[in-house]
Image (cartoon, rainbow, N blue to C red):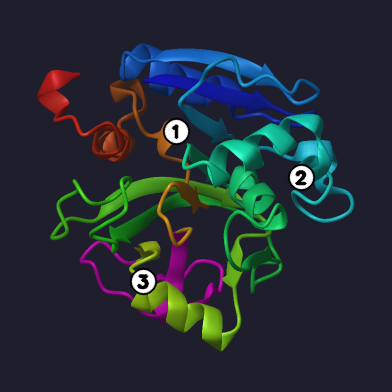
Amino acid sequence: MKFGVIVFPGSNCDDDMVYALETIMNQKVVKLWHKENDLKGCDFIMVPGGFSYGDYLRSGAIARFSPIMTSVIEHANKGGYVMGVCNGFQILTEAGLLPGALIRNSGRLFICQNQFIKPVSKTALLTKNLDFSTVFNIPIAHGDGRYYADNETIKSLEDNDQILFHYSDKFGNVNDDSNPNGSLKNIAGVSNKTKNVFGMMPHPERAVDSDLKNTDGQFLFASLLNLTLENI
């Protein structure tokens, strides 16, 4: 599989994503500049974290209009895979590729910490190969990460198995105490209805290297690629 990692002005997790996919997961990866239209034959487009355009208007709101996004939307509408992490998740909601919105954290502060998440969707590519009895410790770093949607959208997400992860504690309990940012239903990530577009606030690409004492992100990428860690 060939991955494309988009680079916007203000992206700061693009190299982390390239490292995770190329060096750790042994995948073919190219960078895609936001002013280009060519996806360079990539099968899977990654929209990384950062502060695209400085988040000066609203997180992801300007990046959504970069030329590359026209091609990304076309790719997704044809069934191509797209995944956004943190600011990338925000961009995909602004582009209408994912339901809901990411708004200011309930505590009004930027949060940077390790956070346990629990896989939910048994049909989405990103999660269906994970151990559902396990929680994963994945870093978060955001100021506008509170997932919000109206009641009808939340019900649709639940009915269609589109919720990818819930924020939890280390025992897998999903409650207010394990919710770092006030997201509705402790939602940490969602997919679209056809489950070819994924978004999550936690950063799996920051948890793939043993030097950082956390490799839980490898499990997520392995699930995405339908691999076992022994195959990496």
Question: Mark 3 = which residue?
Answer: 160
Residue named by callout 2? 64
Pinpoint residue 104: horizontal percent, then vertical percent. 71, 66
Residue most extreme to the bottom: 151
Q: Earlier in the sequence, mark 3 or mark 2?
A: 2
Single out the residue that lies furthest toward the right.
Answer: 57
The amino acid beneath tag 1 is Arg
Q: Is residue 62 magenta?
A: no
Above or below for 3 versus 120: above
Q: Quadrant of the N terminus?
A: top left
Front-most of residues 44 and 74: 74
Which of the pair 169/193 is nearer the observer? 193
Query: Hey, which quadrant is residue 74 in on the image?
Result: top right
Residue shown at the point (36%, 71%) measured from the top left: 160
Write down the region rendered in magenta: 168-190
Position of residue 116 relative to residue 171, above or below, is above
The 10 Å Cα crowd at callout 3, few under 14, some 14 to 19, many 20 or more, is some
Q: Residue at x 30, y 31 (%)?
A: 213
Q: Where's residue 198, x and y in %?
A: 47, 49
Q: Is label 2 or label 1 in front?
A: 2
Any part of residue 49 in sight: no
Secondary structure of residue under mark 2: helix
Disc 1 is placed on an element classified as helix
Q: Earlier in the sequence, mark 3 or mark 1?
A: 3
Q: Secondary structure at mark 3?
A: loop
Gap in angstroms between the C-alphas marked 3 and 1: 29 Å
Q: Residue at x 41, y 39 (%)?
A: 204
* Amino acid on which the number 3 mark rests in the picture: Asn
Find out whether the residues at labels 2 and 1 contact each other: C-beta distance under 8 Å: no
Looking at the picture, tell me which residue is in the foreground, 29 or 119: 29
Residue wearing tag 1: 206
Q: How many marks?
A: 3
